[in-house]
Amino acid sequence: MNNAPLTDDNAMWKQRFRMHQYRGYLAKCNHQRGLVASNQSGIYQLYSWTISNGQLRQLTNHSEGKRDGFISCDGRFVYYLNDKKGNETGHYTRIDVDTGKEVDLTPGREPYSSLGFHTDGIGKTIAYLTTDHEKGCQLFTQSVTMDSIGEPSLIYETANFTINPILSYNGDLVVIETTDVKKGIGSILVVFDISNNGRLISTLDYGHGVNVVPKQFASLPNDIRLLAKSNRTGANRPLIWNVRTNEQIDFIFDQFGIEGDIDPLDWSEDGNFILLLHIHNAIFRLYCYSIVDKTINALIEQPSGMIHDARFGPDGTIVVQWENAHTPRRIVALNVNNGAVEKVILGPSKIENLITRSQRSVTFSSSDKQLIQGRLTLPSTHADGPLAAIIDVHGGPAFVTSEKFDPVSEAWVDHGFAYLSINYRGSITFGREFEHKIYSDIGHWEVEDIVAARTWLVEQGIARPNTIFLTGWSYGGYLTLLTLGKQSSLWAGGLAGIAIADWTMLYEDSAESLKTYEVSLFGGTPAEKPELYAAASPITYVEQISAPVLIIQGANDTRCPARQMKCFESKMRQLNKKLEIEWFGGGHALNAPEQLILHIEKMLCWTHRVLEENNAKTTSQSKTAALF
Ligand SMILES: CSCC[C@H](NC=O)C(=O)N[C@@H](Cc1ccccc1)C(=O)O
């Protein structure tokens, strides 16, 4: 243990980061075309994808990379937010896939951030949400044809957190998910009739603390049934809502005895089947439900691992974005009846000479007896007993960590560390109560769960108590800094990336879209809830921090902006705390494998140094003690 970090260019841990990964989407009504985001050029960019021959043609060339784009139903156009240096603020732009010609959809407007974009089923209308300082959150629709782009038409404005615009097949209706009227937890659906001056025609509200999330309208002309999900039973379950008649069909599935979240992913073209993703305790399984027969079919042969997206594909297949501990993210075709992998559509079919470890799901009790689940990776031999350990905290908070191809955990384990990623309170897929527990009490239960993870690692004999480090990016970086302050004696060090240090300053500086999200997390603005914002902020606890800290922060990040971290840095310096901070030129997305390799190398070297210094201190203390 305590191996010096492997810094040579070909170290295996670096090779894993360089593996090509693929996210791919077929055009809804033309299964011959698709959109791919891949790191195959050395940084994530968008590609047009010809399905028949697997050919990819690069569409974007952004210096900080590009991962998110949207393909029109016929596959002729790709839309994306054209931002500057990864700052997630810019203009929506349309690329003609055949000619490569790019058109700005909103010339003359100030740059904006956005929380959603959607295209209809006939290639005539797009809908998107933009947010800026003056106007708050605005819903626009815009007519788009092969040769022309119309003016944006404002449908709705709100100051509240609003996401997920979804157009009906014909593009004459648009639905959004908004926290209007909720003041904090939960959301409602609101539908507007675009063909009738954007008139509000219906809302769906299941009451306080319940979320409703729109997924997709039926793919049939004039069919205005919306596939959605709601967590009103305590876990996410699908529903179909006729937005004009208000008729609702709930798929609770109690009769099938399935526990946990069931998310609707796709609706078959004939409207007879829905594709379902069952996620329970971070395990992902696909099901196909027949609306006509009311039967559910488990795709029992599907591979284990994480499913990011799945859609009904051509020739009785399901096209799935999938990865597991041994396989980088790729696109595979699964048999619609049994889930067996029929072929790898995009991605290398075999991984040569690369060691990857199995990841074990573990559970432990938090301070209030709530079970917390995590993913543990260990070196294959650890005969020397307890190890130095990393506790990894995911971002979000509304994410989940599950079995995946994970070059980061492997890099630490290559260097002899035990690595535990945890799904703390606030994570999704453990039920509504678990997810909502942190609202208006940000940073409280998350820290309890992190401390419980540490206790468990020590009790199990996996980790040495004085060699446990905390790490995370974004919300995970936030929790790293917060826990170092609130529970300072427990840690050998903390490594935080693109992190939150001061919620009030973050509110002042972050993109407008994120401001409304913060208000829903805290149940109010910093002016309305100053104590909550202060109590949740790492900067409040700097005095207590005793372990060394390494921070890696993006200069162009509009989610976790620079100023709040600069203030944290100067307070740490004033109080003579051990801090190393590295600024890099990008935004919030980590799109370039080589840059991530540099970050992780920095972290490995820093941790090695901290452990050596601690070792030297302990040795000299025991020598001094021996003199008396
Ligand atoms: C749909 S927008 C929600 C924001 C998103 N959280 C998802 O759970 C996110 O960007 N989270 C950041 C951290 C953050 C949270 C609140 C305000 C600013 C940043 C992340 O962890 O990446």
Image: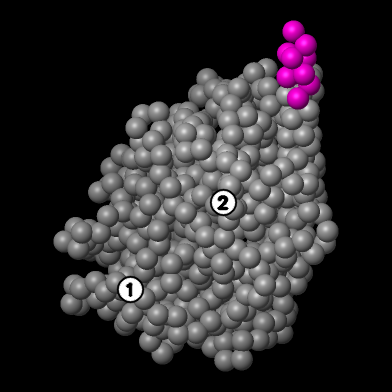
In the structure shown, which secondary structural element does the residue marked by tag 1 occupy? loop
Classed neighbour count for the residue bearing mark 2: other residues with Cα under 10 Å, few (<14), some (14–19), many (≥20): many
Give left or right: position of 471 versus 159.
Answer: right
Residue positioned 62% across, 82% down in the render: 49
Which mark is nearer the camera, 2 or 1?
2
In magenta, the rendered stretch is 619-628
How far apart are the alpha carbons under marks 2 and 1? 29 Å
Determine if residue 4 is in view: yes
The residue that disc 2 covers is: 378
Determine if residue 89 is in view: no
Find residue 467 and report its horizontal and vertical position in percent: 64, 34
First of labels 2, 1 by sequence position: 1
Q: Quadrant of the C terminus?
A: top right
Residue most toward the top?
628
Q: Is residue 533 above or below residue 56?
A: above
- Check residue 230 in the rendering and tell me which mark sits there, or answer none: none
- Check residue 300 in the rendering and tell me which mark sits there, or answer none: 1
Find residue 503 and report its horizontal and vertical position in percent: 60, 31
What amino acid does circle 2 point to? Leu
Q: Is residue 438 above or below residue 119?
A: above
Find residue 515 and report its horizontal and vertical position in percent: 57, 39
